[in-house]
Amino acid sequence: MSHPAKPLSAVADTVLTGARVRTLDPGRATASAVAVKDGYITAVGDESDVRDWRGADTEIVDLAGATLTPGLVDGHSHPYLGLEMATGLDLSGCGDLDALRTALADAARAAAPGDWVLAYGLDHNAFGGRPVHHDLIDPALGGVPAFIRLYDGHSALASGPALAAAGIDGPHRFAQRAQVVCDPDGRPTGHLVEFAAMGLMDHVLPRESAAVRRERLLALLRDMAATGLTGAHVMDLQDPGLLALLAGIEEDGELPVRLRIAPWCMPDTGEEGLDHLVGLQRSHGRRWRIGGVKFFMDGTVEGGTAWLEHADCHGQGTDAFWPDPAAYTRAVHHLARAGVRTVTHAIGDAAVRHVLDTVELLEDPRQRALHRIEHIETVPDSQLPRFARLGVAASMQPTHLAYTRADHRDEWSLRLGEERAGRAWRCRDLRDAGATLLLGSDWPIAHYDPREVLATARLRRLPGQPETEPVTAEQALTGLMALEGYTSHSALAVGEQDVAGRIAPGCRADLTAFAVDPVTAPADELGAAPVTLTMTGGTVVHRA
């Protein structure tokens, strides 16, 4: 949320000293001390300046040689929706069907009468190339209904009893690209693809109370702050209760992490709905605000719903999420004319091209600069220079590489084929082409810890796994580029470069301190390095 710069004050509330300060400010690249008052940075300097900033009530925090950076901001996260998506049994460690069946059988035996087995994080690769089908898991569950979210967040597997409980007994028609996958005889396989199909289960799935959801959200945000996050771009607002929940939290205290929320715009949204989204942009609290609108131009590669210029190796992927792509263009233009920023999920090359085409049709450069594209998993050379030319930011999640393999023997690569898999997550090419590139996690699709994302952006594999061959290693970012993706480029992407993304007088006092230098430390070391302090709005929200 933008605010005018605050005037400098002679006496600080807090002084951070003994630091190696990476300001990311062109006016002063390094320093060793920072003064904070009323939630803003009032001075940046050296140890000799500290005595001029302090008063009787000034708190002096000695960072003992830690590296202080602008506060880290996750460019793509789902902290509220993710609490629902990450409920139950974590199946991310199941590498094959035997492991999956064992985990489900154990959960079913532990279930009380009437309970469900809820699970999440299941990798498509666990099926070993077999079609996703409830017959593969039903015997292990022994009749206990189960609903399993696959790791991509865009698909799920419902057991036979779960389908029966929800009354899903055949194909359905949807206003958006979604599918209840059925066998040749019209019987559901349990594979539910995209949000509308998964939503058919909502009325029978167990739900937690609002009080439990509030406590889980606060605990999650505290844990995020402990990893160095001071903010997150939240890519969902389906439940209007979220705003009341955030307002209630701020009645009792402060959010540990600043939240910028983009509600969804789906294909059946008319002009009245678009105007409602425009009006929502005025909603805000002290550390949260509505800021933008989220679109989907496609789904996922593994689910066969990424929009590709040419069909994938299963003959799928040639349809957009919006059945009429021109209607998407009209909706984006409606919001752009109202000055509303948009973010669009676009994984496939056709989806990315269509979003860029949509922005290019806007004649006003100020309206063009309001847009960004999320994920961008595969894109040809021809599209790279368009990002910088049109002012469209690229938002990417390096840790999604964990679901692919350098030898292309994973489901993502096998779906796309060698050529398209060879241009996976082109982070470096986009930076070299002059694009604004912000980084994030897409939690709960991948872990929210920014140290893991920063390290993976440099390694092209997860940190701590030196035996893993990097995926498209030539796309590695430098340490500075990666840090910029969580700080200065994140601020640029939302028009907050005057108050965020730098350590400079007048900027918000959102700050992160690492035990190591995140730019020069070995990336594997960074992935597990302590975060010694996190400050949000001038308040220390985590201290090691």
Image (spheres, grey):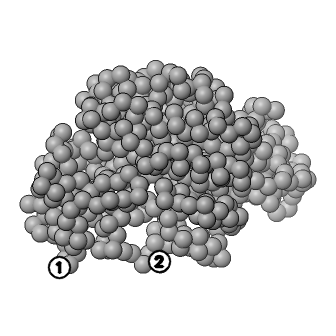
Residue plotted at (45% across, 32% down) = 349
Residue 129 spot, x, y in % from top left: 18, 39
In this rendering, would 39 be left or right of 335? right
Residue plotted at (82% across, 48% down) = 506
Amino acid beneath label 1: Pro
Amino acid beneath label 2: Ala
Q: Which residue is mark 2?
A: 210
Residue plotted at (35% across, 44% down) = 305
Above or below — where is 407 with respect to 402?
Answer: above
**3D distance between C-alphas at marks 2 and 1:** 24 Å
Q: Quadrant of residue 404?
A: top left
Q: Which residue is mark 1?
A: 113
Disc number at residue 392? none
The mark tally for this picture is 2
- Name the element at disc 2: helix
Q: Is residue 140 or residue 297 the one in the foreground?
A: 297
Q: Is residue 70 or residue 238 the one in the foreground?
A: 238
